[in-house]
């Protein structure tokens, strides 16, 4: 299965880039994983939140091409690590060839993006920076793959 993490903006912190690279390398043993970084919206301080979300949607929507599109959103469904692994495994068993997980900008997603998404997923009740979520997602996806394979990374 091909899994893409699509994000707005570059990963600016080197320690986050290194962590993501580490997990992407580990994931290559299980799945075709990549992270797509789209350019941030220019002049975001001068426009309304709604206009920002609309401009962001114009960048995001053409990139969303997977069979399953899942938004990473604070209002999304929460899973345990086992529950997330079960969700990924079920998609694999069903023959899903591709999944896009999407991290939006600081103001959430425009309704046009929400309409084409299959669901929303929340990684925590806590709020994290959009930069950190990238690393957390890569780690949780790796954890899910090791759970699916019955490997010892996840100790339950």
Image (spheres, rainbow, N blue to C red):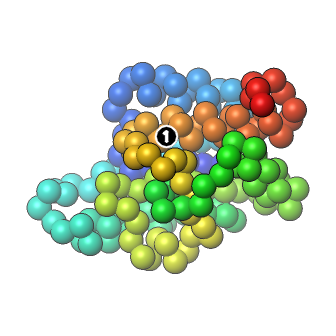
Quadrant assignment for the C terminus: top right
Q: Residue visible at 56% across and 41% down?
A: 137
* The image quarter in which residue 98 lies: bottom right
Q: Which of 97 and 50 is in front in this view?
A: 50
Question: Could you tell me residue 14's position as x and y percent?
Answer: 39, 23
Question: Could you tell me residue 124's position as x and y percent?
Answer: 52, 47
Which secondary structure, mark 1?
helix
Question: Could you tell me residue 55's position as x and y percent?
Answer: 30, 67
Q: Is residue 143 left or right of residue 139?
A: right
Q: Residue visible at 52% across and 25% down?
A: 19
Q: Is residue 14 above or below residue 5?
A: above
Q: How crowded is mark 1: few (under 14 residues within 10 Å), some or many (20 or more)?
A: many
Identify the residue under disc 1: 134
Question: Could you tell me residue 45's position as x and y percent?
Answer: 14, 56
* The image quarter in which residue 30 lies: top right
Q: Is residue 59 visible?
A: no
Q: Which of 153 and 58 is in front in this view?
A: 153
Q: Is residue 8 left or right of residue 118?
A: left
């Amino acid at each position: 299965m091909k899994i893409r993490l699509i994000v707005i903006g570059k990963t600016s912190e080197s320690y986050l880039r290194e962590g993501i690279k580490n997990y992407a390398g580990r994931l290559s043993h299980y799945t075709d994983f990549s992270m797509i970084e789209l350019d941030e919206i220019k002049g975001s301080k001068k426009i309304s939140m709604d206009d920002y979300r609309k401009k962001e949607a114009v960048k995001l929507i053409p990139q969303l091409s997977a069979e399953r599109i899942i938004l990473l959103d604070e209002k999304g469904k929460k899973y345990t690590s086992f529950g997330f692994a079960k969700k990924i495994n079920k998609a694999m068993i069903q023959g899903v060839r591709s999944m896009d997980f999407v991290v939006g900008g600081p103001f959430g997603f425009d309704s046009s993006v929400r309409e084409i998404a299959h669901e929303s997923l929340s990684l925590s009740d806590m709020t994290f920076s959009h930069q950190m979520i990238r690393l957390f997602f890569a780690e949780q996806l790796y954890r899910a793959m090791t759970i699916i394979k019955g490997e010892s990374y996840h100790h339950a």
